[in-house]
Image (spheres, grey):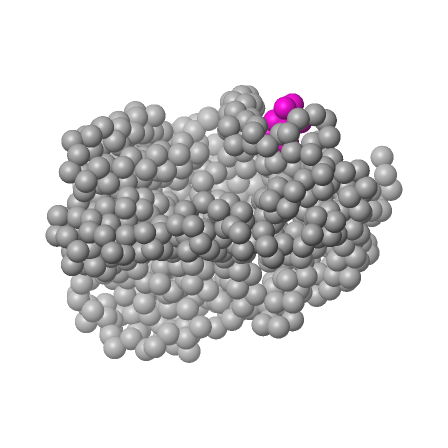
Amino acid sequence: MHSPADRPIALAVRGLSKSFDRPAVDALSLTIYGGEFYALVGPNGAGKTTTLRMVVGLLRPDAGSIVIGGIDTLARPEDAKQITAWLSDEPMIYDKLTPFEYLEFVAGLWGIDARQAETRARELIGWLGLAPHAHERCEGFSKGMRQKVALAGALVHDPKLIILDEPLTGLDAGSARLVKNVLRERVAAGGTVIMTTHILEVAERMADRIGVIASGRLIAEGTLDELRHMTGKTATSLEDTFLTLVADPVAQAVAAE
Amino acid sequence: MSQPATLTWLAGHELRLGWRDWVSLMTAGRRSRARTVAIALIVFAAFMHLFAYWIVAGYADATVAADTATLVGITGTLLLSWSLLLSQAMESVTRAFYARSDLDLILTSPASARKVFAVRMGRIAAASVLVAVLLAAPFIDVLAMRGGARWLSAYGVVAGMGAVATAFALALTIALFRLIGAKRTRLIAQIAAAVIGAAFVIGLQIAAIFSSGSISRFAALQSPWMLAHAPNTHSAFWWPAHAVLGDAHALVAVAAASFALLAAAIALFSGRFGEHAHAAASVGSAVVRQRRSLGFRRRSPMRVLRQKEWTLLLRDPWLVSQTLMQILYLLPPAVLLWVTFRDATGSYVILIPVVVMAAGQLAGGLAWLSISGEDAPDLIASSPIPAGRVLRAKIEAVIGMIALVFAPIVAVLACEALSGALVSALGILAAAAAATLIQICFRTQAKRSQFRRRQTSSRIATFAEAFSSIAWAATSALAAAGSWFALGPALAALGILVGVRVISPRA
């Protein structure tokens, strides 16, 4: 991997904080570069989803700043959203629309030229294996199918930054591979992908850099080798490295074995 | 502590789930509200007793040796109440069939599925009986206070009615499963439940209008034709009425027959419950193909949003039936108008408040669906459309739908009197806009499928919506009649909106 520093910054987060009953995200800072695949990992309740929901404008931070592609999201949220896509772990689509209609709706929301959007939608429907179901209502779809429709919706407006929260949860092996391939292609084409995942193997194989978050703070960040170096164990898997980094007593015990 | 998997153990489990469901429904999931809810329930019970006193105190002297008119009146009232109980029981039974929650657990456990489902049906029956008893309690209490303890036997009759309603609901729903299959049963059963609840009342009102020109459903029950054709006072047909009046023998017979019928229904159908519930659980995989679209159309984001709301509503027959059900209630006043004023001029004035009231109620439902019942909130919120414009598009979708439904009525009114049509159009717009604003103030995130439970998310919003519609209806009626008194209810309607804005969680 080339040094990312010479690339434009796709996302810059500074001192981001959010509290509910207790602090969920605590003065978190993060820099992600264009054309980078970044995986955010951490234990349950670490603040990964809250961080990403603030980045895409679904939650308002208590403090801090978020800049996407040079656009301050708090000052110009619509401009930032125009180049961003969000995909949550639970695919939110409309049961009574077909995939084709759903993509037309999303393209309309993003104000994409109809002809261009249709071409792109047909490509995505083909890539994701949705063609036989393109004109069926989504209400009978499996979780994997719904996730593919939602992913197509995230890509139809050709975003520069794609943010995904646990996109592979509940997908079968074939669908998961398809989604991973589509994301890789996006990165190869210069897009930026940020993804949270509990499947550490996915982060290990796909991500250029990995951020480890615990208790709302970014406790470590870097390539897999850099993370291993931080723990002082160069031959361990990401799982061992992760468990050591998050310093959970149980996790540490497992990692020590 | 009973042994696991026995009837009593299962009943205890169902009772605990039922209690927690009820508490959650009442407190909207917030335990801190428990005290407020308790106080509200006490106030409501006191109010209902006062209301009951106003309605039934004059009938407390009726004796066991009642005449035909009294027996017809009591039996008619029981039948009216029973139709509502049947409607409620059908809703519960249908919900139980389609609730997948613990179906797999039950069917894969070594416990007898028949026993488990028998207990579940018992729970539905218990809930029906409880609802019946609670609703009737203020009336029975007032009658007992005024006319003596003999009236307390009415509790037994009402409990029996709840049991019979559940037995019929089970039989009807199972019959629907067998006749039209699991795929269509849900929709048909829910529509049937709503129609059963409304049709009997509406039918009696229309009969009363034709026979006496009154909208009171009791006018039909007390009509000479009805009294002349009623069975004689010693007929078994009147046993429930005799039981209500304190006849112990009739009470024992009615209660025993009711609960025997329920037991027979449970014994007969509990074996098939699992089979039908399983069929219901696999309904989701049905494929609905839409006509192929010609291609993406060039539209503004606002238009895209409005179109989405209309498409989602029009493709959901259950939602359409639920939202338009209120139009059914327009029938009696419309018939009354036609019968009473068909030869008179100026009759349209009577229709205006009914139409305005219906518009307000319909707009409230549509606004909830559009604003709170958004199934892809993250998609909308992460799109580059400012939240204000999204909201505006949704409001336009609601008002557009209201315009579509009520334009023909206003057009007909315009043929009668242009000024009346103008007043009703303004009234419809005001009532719809007010109901929509109330929904905006109390909006929450919910699934469209939760539409039937929308009232529980905010009772204040529900009451405000109803009172606002009533106030705009009164304003329109008075304005159409050319009275300056129209300003009174108009100010009240505006006051409701100000109040809602002040207490809104979003203020």
Q: Is residue A132 magenta?
A: no
Q: Taking A31 as reference, is B454 left or right?
A: right
Q: Residue at x 16, y 59 (%)?
A: B415
Q: Seen in the image, is B382 located left or right of residue B242?
A: left
Residue at the farthest right position: B3
Q: Is residue A231 visible?
A: no
Q: Is residue A63 above or below residue A91?
A: above
Q: Which residues are magenta?
A: B138-146
User: Quick one: quadrant of the C terminus of chain B?
Assistant: top left
* Front one among B320 and A135: B320
Location of residue A223 in the rendering, given as x and y in whole percent from the top left corner: 41, 48
Q: Give x and y (percent) for residue A73.
A: 23, 40
Magenta residues: mostly which secondary structure?
A: helix
Q: With B228 as the anchor, is B337 left or right in this view?
A: left
| In the foreground, A148 or A195 | A148
Q: Position of residue B500 (x, y in %)?
A: 31, 29
Magenta region includes residue B141: yes
Relative to B93, does residue B298 appear above or below in the rendering?
A: below
The image position of residue A110, as x and y in percent, is: 22, 57
Which of these two is toward me, B54 or A130?
B54
Residue A136's image quarter? bottom left
